[in-house]
Amino acid sequence: MDRTKKFDILFRLGEILKSVGQKHDWPGYEIGVNEEEYKQLQELTKTVHVYNGWFTEDSILKSFTGLSKWLSKSNLESFTSSYSAPKKEKTIAIIMAGNIPLVGFHDLMCVYLSGHKALIKMSSDDDKILPQLLNIWRLFDENIDNQIQLAQGKLENFDAVIATGSDNSSSYFQDYFGKYPHIIRKHRTSVGILTGEETRDELVQLGHDIFDYYGLGCRNVSKLFVPKGYDFKDFFEAIFDFNPIIHHHKYANNYDYNKAVYLMNQVPILDNNFIMLKEDETIYSPLGVVLYEFYEDDQKLNNKLIGLKNEIQVIAGKNHVQFGAAQSPEIDDFADRIDTMEFLATLS
């Protein structure tokens, strides 16, 4: 199948994701699925939390809406325009993470568009949504089962690997899959840079970078660099409307535990009863905590960020990714800045 047909198929899938993501009622047969099929996907967004408490309806709807933005025909055409089709079809094993809903969809999309086959090992934390999407995908592409397979048990009969996981799992991936052509991603996090001149709306948008998906994504901001003497008063006021996050029991458990540890160890923190700020030179924070570090010299800060480039997924702030966009990547924002499409195009 040529790419133009695949653009149309993914566009139709994207229209369904967009409609469900925006909580629209079934719009009619023009959407490409009947009312029962549409409602099955809607119902899934409301019940997945039973299997994974982090996957609330709002999180899944946000994921659907974000993915749908990639799947316009113009985006897909532009995204693939500089990549040639592979000389030979390969089977690509995709080992997906499960920290946020459908976090592995971009890899799957790349394999599908490249002309290779995908053999997917889903995370047990996110194994309910993708099979339902494939049921819908199948309505538009009758050959989808030849292109995308969900692995049961041990991965076998593949030619290359794309794997995403923690630092611990990446070591295992390297040992097990290192002999194959591969992309193996480790744990990363994201940081924000404040100048002290941010508007209230910019600080509100920064709140999305911190709290969307409960802070579980590698694109969530877990560390702030702030100018020496920065007063967090405006920041705390701007993020106040995110306070309902504390009513999520899993988030609250993490917040309470970390707060207790800090208090017992007399660690100084700033606290607004749903997020803690802790001064620290590291960039990885526990859940319910944002670290901060003062800076005085822009060049020294820039040099530090360069030194941390292999640990940072996104830098949010002036002259970087705008606040509020950290968890809304563009279609060509490749994870770890590794061009997945180029990797797939050059397999021989």
Image: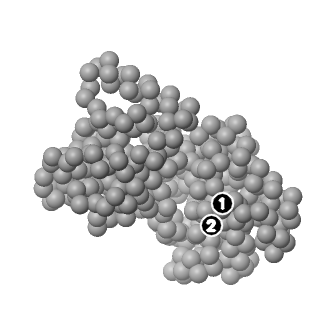
Q: Is residue 54 visible from the viewing direction of this image?
A: yes
The residue to which callout 2 is attached is 68
Coloring applied to the structure? one colour
- Taking the spot 52% from the left edge, 55% from the top edge, the residue there is 182
- Which quadrant of the rendered structure holds the N terminus? bottom right
Number of the front mark, 2 or 1: 1
User: Hey, which residue is sitting farthest top in the picture?
Assistant: 264
User: Dot 1: what SS?
Assistant: helix
Task: Give the number of marks.
Answer: 2
- Whether the residues at callouts 2 and 1 have beta carbons within 8 Å, the answer is yes
Residue closest to the eye, 289 or 219: 289
Q: Residue 21 carries which label?
A: 1
Identified by mark 1, the residue type is Gly
Query: Taking 66 as reference, is 214 above or below it?
Result: above
In which image quadrant can residue 107 be found? bottom right
Identified by mark 2, the residue type is Ser
- Taking the spot 83% from the left edge, 70% from the top edge, the residue there is 28
In percent of width and height, residue 235 lies at 32, 49
N-term mark: 2 or 1: 1
Mark 2 crowd level (few <14, some 14–19, many ≥20, 10 Å Cα) = many
Query: Taking 259 as reference, is 191 above or below it?
Result: below
In percent of width and height, residue 340 lies at 51, 64
In percent of width and height, residue 259 lies at 38, 26
Q: Is residue 312 visible from the viewing direction of this image?
A: no
Residue closest to the eye, 6 or 224: 224
